[in-house]
Image: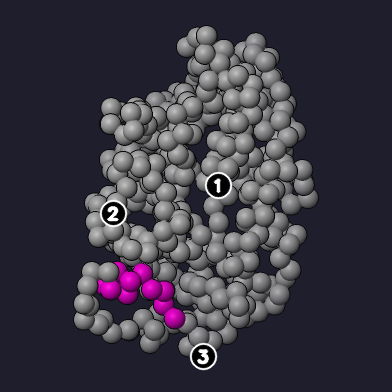
Amino acid sequence: MKRVIVGLSGGVDSSVAAYLLQQQGYEVIGLFMKNWHDDSVTISNECPWLEDSNDAMLVAEKLGIPFQVVDLSEQYKDKIVDYMFREYELGRTPNPDVLCNREIKFDVFLKIALDLGADFVATGHYCRKAEIDVDVDDKPVYQLLSGKDSNKDQSYFLCQLSQEQLETSLFPIGELTKPEVRAIAAEQDLITADKKDSQGLCFIGKVRLPDFLQQKLQPKEGVIVQIPSDAETFKRSIPTFKSKEEELAFYATKFNYSRDGGKVVGKHQGAHYFTKGQRKGLAVGGTKEALYVIETDVDKNIIYAGEGKNHPGLYRNVLFVTNDEIHWIREDLRLNTGKSLEVEARIRYRQQLEKATIHKVENGLYVAFQNPQSAITEGQFVAWYQEDELLGSGVIS
């Protein structure tokens, strides 16, 4: 009998994943990952780990499977929290959920599971895995596919997984919709059947981000500068390009702002607390439409804002990923320099896939979208697909 260790989070998805695996004849063991100790920055009652671990234990009891809690808070701090602080300090916006899957669930947790004699680990992610017959070093090639429920597809969060990680992973609910998962949980009288989905950081819950960041990043008063939509920086002349790469580099270049190019409309407590596209938290009134963050300058501690969600400062259609940040799930499809590939891509979770072309150049990879994208943000992940298969991803530079 194959042994599977399920990451029981205390939610309905992982609960049903454990039940389905049990029905399929696996020997199932439930493990709850405790990743966080500091409740001072979490928003109460949103995702308290104690309640979640208790629910996970009750599900395990109901299913009659072994259960234990593993404390990974030290590894989580080293691999995720410290990384977040570094990224925000640099004026970038990290995605801890993607990193949590790569570094914690499918690395630290996976190694613990294998040490416990597991053949596989399983999670409650809405995605699917397939195996195809491609001759690569006499090894099978695994595909990471979107979940059948397009409203809940979570493949984006797994965009940094490797072939080795996929080999020992199972996603039992990937063929189901959320209502079907809840119906199964209700039929089996699982305590999590009607539990609302957790939100916020992976295995931490909803966090007051400024409070969280202030643990390491001190408040520092600066100004908010409003850039008009007809500012000169948006009227840059288009040069004659000598090559496709030169054209891509031009359109991937961010707009250049200065304090003199707009008017000071407010103050903030630290540019590193804000991210592109952010609307809430600016606390500036008196404009016809809401103000959005269009750029942050952490060196000068200035936030540049634009009025309205159609402000030109929010939009670009080309982004760049450096060589050391390119990740291919399908290594057999990796592009050589000078080659391009038609794909669909997204730059954030729950964004609709958009038509794009990826171009491999000597020092990295350009993703050129057919349509301009709002708030392309450094530090976030761009993921590229063909049909329902996620081929690879990269950190936006």
Q: Amino acid at mark 2?
A: Asn
Q: Report the magenta residues as a range.
A: 246-256
N-term mark: 1 or 2:
1
Q: Residue at x 40, y 30 (%)?
A: 128
Reading the image, the residue beneath label 2 is 336
Element marked by disc 3? helix
Q: Position of residue 132 (x, y in %)?
A: 30, 28
Sooner in the amino-acid sequence: mark 2 or mark 3: 3
Q: CA distance from mark 2 to mark 3?
A: 43 Å
Q: Could you tell me which secondary element the residue under label 1 belongs to?
A: helix
Residue drawn where x is 58% and y is 31% of the image = 110
Q: Quadrant of residue 151?
A: top left
* Mark 2, secondary structure of its residue: loop
Q: Position of residue 207 (x, y in %)?
A: 67, 51
Q: Nearer the viewer, mark 3 or mark 1?
A: 1
User: What residue is disc 1 on?
Assistant: 99
254 is within the stretch colored magenta: yes
Q: Nearer the viewer, mark 1 or mark 2?
A: 2
Q: Is residue 29 left or right of residue 328?
A: right
**Residue 261 makes an appearance in the image:** yes
In the rendered structure, which amino acid carries the disc numbered 1? Leu
Residue at the location (52% across, 46% down)? 98
User: What residue is shown with label 3?
Assistant: 260
